[in-house]
Image (cartoon, helix red, strand yellow):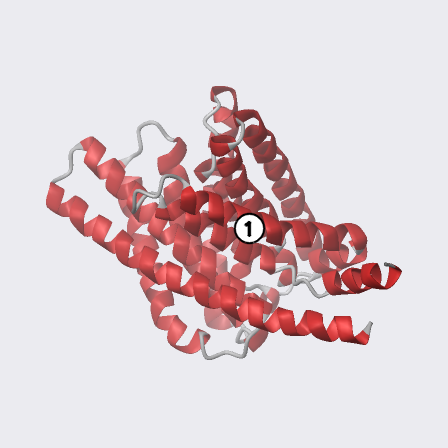
Amino acid sequence: MATRMMTLHQRLQHAPTPMAGLALGISSLGWAWESFAPLGGVAQICGALVASVLLALLTAKFVLHPRLLWADLAHPVVGSVVPTFAMATMVVSKAAGTWLAPTLGVTLWLVAVALHLLFLVAFVVHRVRGFELHHMVPAWFVPPVGIIVADVAFPGTAALHPLALGLLWLGMGLYAVLLPVMIYRLIFAAEIPDPAKPTIAIMAAPASLSLAGYLSVVASPSPLLVALLGGIAVLMTLIIYLAFIRLLRLPYSPGYAAFTFPMVIGATALVKTAAWMQQVGFHHHDIAIVHGLATLEIVVASVIVGYVALRYLSFYLGTWRLAAGAA
């Protein structure tokens, strides 16, 4: 028994922190498909269950090896994706509130929001110390802008609506501040190293996430802001589609998880936009175009998430077998 426990203990050390990003992508994909097909909640539940297993593995890793969490938080790249753990928990909280108990969903949502804010503070503290421009990677959008997932997964409790609005404006404001700095870094600073290049795909996420969150919690969205965010979201997604020609040729790394959520949230934002356009009376032809783009994006997102999940599974099953053999 002791040998088996030690083997499990060692295996958990090999669970990569970016796997939280994959959990976020899988849970978001299951939820997104509910808007495209009459699945009766099956996709949302399945996505939440798979994500919960991945999050449970990471939770066990950090409980048994807390020094690994501190090391991850201090890393300029890995530290920026640690908040995807909280973001995935927010998405799971939506499924829990819908299919188990509303109180459970609200509790999980609040815990995830608090956790994300703690990760954001830790990220800022570590990055302010010894800041260097070339350390910046697109994953740096995750801690400040990723909090908007709380709005997309908002449980709908009236008492918490001011908090949801505050998180939305916080995330969007930080995105507006960080975007020009990131563009300057990508143009004028050193090239992003290969292990961190998958994070380039995250450039597609902030505008889409901002749009999805905005349409989720704002009662009367501004058509101008919807058009601005929608235009940026579609443009950035198309750019990342082209970037996949090279990104998918990179050697496998845990950073592949960065491919998943940006693709899913793009489709989510567009389907929410189509629903809003129908609500305010846009012409059916215009709505059909936006919904068609959303359908294309959800298909691409499904392929990308499936591909990354298979790469993770094949690689880490092999790694854990080696760890077990060594034990």
The residue to which callout 1 is attached is: 51
Is 145 situated above or below 314?
above
Specify the amino acid type for callout 1: Ala
Instruction: Identify the residue shown where x is 68% and y is 62%.
Output: 15
Residue at horizontal 48 percent and vertical 25 percent from the top? 161
Quadrant where the image shows the N terminus = bottom right
Q: Nearer the viewer, residue 230 or 273?
A: 273
* Res 132 → quadrant: bottom right
Residue 127 rendering spot, x and y as whole percentages? 67, 56
User: Going by the image, does 223 lie left or right of 320?
Assistant: left
Toward the right, the furthest residue is 2
In the image, residue 211 sits, relative to residue 308, either above or below, namely above
Q: Secondary structure at mark 1?
A: helix
Q: Looking at the picture, does residue 46 appear above or below residue 307?
A: above
Q: Which percent across, then down, holds residue 134? A: 59, 69
Would residue 177 be visible to someone looking at this image?
no
**How far from the left and from the top, in percent, is residue 237?**
35, 60
